[in-house]
Image (tube, rainbow, N blue to C red):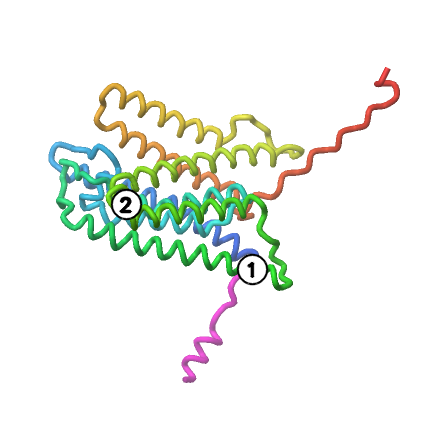
Amino acid sequence: MRWVERVADGQTPGPPPALAAVKTYRYLRLAMVAVVVGLGVAVVHEVLRVEGTCWQTSLSGYYYTPVQNVLVGALVAIGLCLVALKGSTDVEDVLLNVAGVCAPFVAVVPIAEPGSCGVVTDGLNRNLNVANNVTAVLAVVGIALATLAVLWMRNRSRTTEEPPPTRIELLGYAGSVLLFGAAAGVFALRAEAFDRYGHAVAAITMFVLVVADVAVNAVNLHRGRRGTHAPVRRMNRYAWIVLGMVGFAAASGVLGLLGVEHWLLVLEAGLIGCFGVFWGLQTVELWNQGLRPAPPAAPPAEAPTEASTH
């Protein structure tokens, strides 16, 4: 076993824990950017493969094409990254966690009808896949929620440096438990309803929470620059992304009213593209710190002087 000892002796110690944590934040954010790029490449490759440059009417429709594995893997990976990534505030953390839990459901509960554009599967095993995969996702989410409760109780009974959960975190946890119970109940008792509406509910919830998270970042970036030398603008980088997301939603809605078949594809592609841009910009902003520091406290209001009262 001497060769094992030689290998062990030849190791170089890793970075300090604080630096390792910052690097982990970088990798999680960059992983989501890479996943979005990979998903885009897979869709474009499929479009070019099909004769006549045919597009599915929605991004979810690519579940029934060779993009399936990349689509499901991308959404599951994004969900794991969102849950693993700690937000700079408790509000941001709750939004990321719930959005991250929704992402795998968007992946494993596809739309019911395959499109007619380069389809390579007729969805014969779709119901079997949904039954198996949703059961696995629900089991993981249930175990995660139970484990989190046990850890909180354990920290409460012991003296640790970890602060207790805030009111926002407790509300987020309670909401997550209710959502999990509702999803599990509908899946067990009303399988047809879950199969019909599960994808849409999970996708809408995820995108709404993502937009809310970007908006929270816009506000916190604005607040964090007060009292510093950095320029303070009402429309910072994240505010423009929120505006872009809302713009894509409005434009796709107009396209839908006009009868344009691919309005949903425009919406999904636009939101996911903005999602990737957001994580790219946040990676650059927080490259050396991992998390955004707390904004400076507002200066106390001066008491009115005797002269000002007259």
Q: Residue furthest right?
A: 306
Tell me the distance, in whole angstroms, between the alpha carbons under discs 2 and 1.
34 Å
At numbered mark 2, what does the secondary structure look like: helix, strand or loop?
Answer: loop
Amino acid bearing label 2: Arg
Q: Quadrant of the C terminus?
A: top right
Is 151 placed left or right of 39 in the picture? right
* Residue 12 forms part of the magenta stretch: yes
Residue shown at 39% from the left, 51% from the top = 80
Q: Which is nearer the eye, 260 or 156? A: 156
Label at residue 245: none
In this rendering, does residue 111 appear at all?
yes
Q: Quadrant of residue 231?
A: top right
Q: Position of residue 224 (x, y in %)?
A: 60, 36
* Residue 162 forms part of the magenta stretch: no
Q: Which is nearer the eye, 92 or 220? A: 92
Q: Are marks 2 and 1 in contact (CB under 8 Å)?
A: no
Q: Position of residue 16 (x, y in %)?
A: 56, 61
Q: Position of residue 150 (x, y in %)?
A: 51, 60
Please report the bounds of the magenta region as a residue range.
Answer: 1-15
Amino acid bearing label 1: Met
Relative to 253, does residue 291 appear above or below in the rendering? below
N-terminal label among 2 and 1: 1
The residue that disc 2 covers is 190
Q: Residues within 10 Å of mark 2 (few under 14, many from 20)?
A: few
Is 114 placed left or right of 17 in the picture? left
Residue shown at 34% from the left, 38% from the top = 201
Residue shown at 59% from the left, 47% from the top = 166
Q: Position of residue 217 (x, y in %)?
A: 51, 36
The residue that disc 1 covers is 153
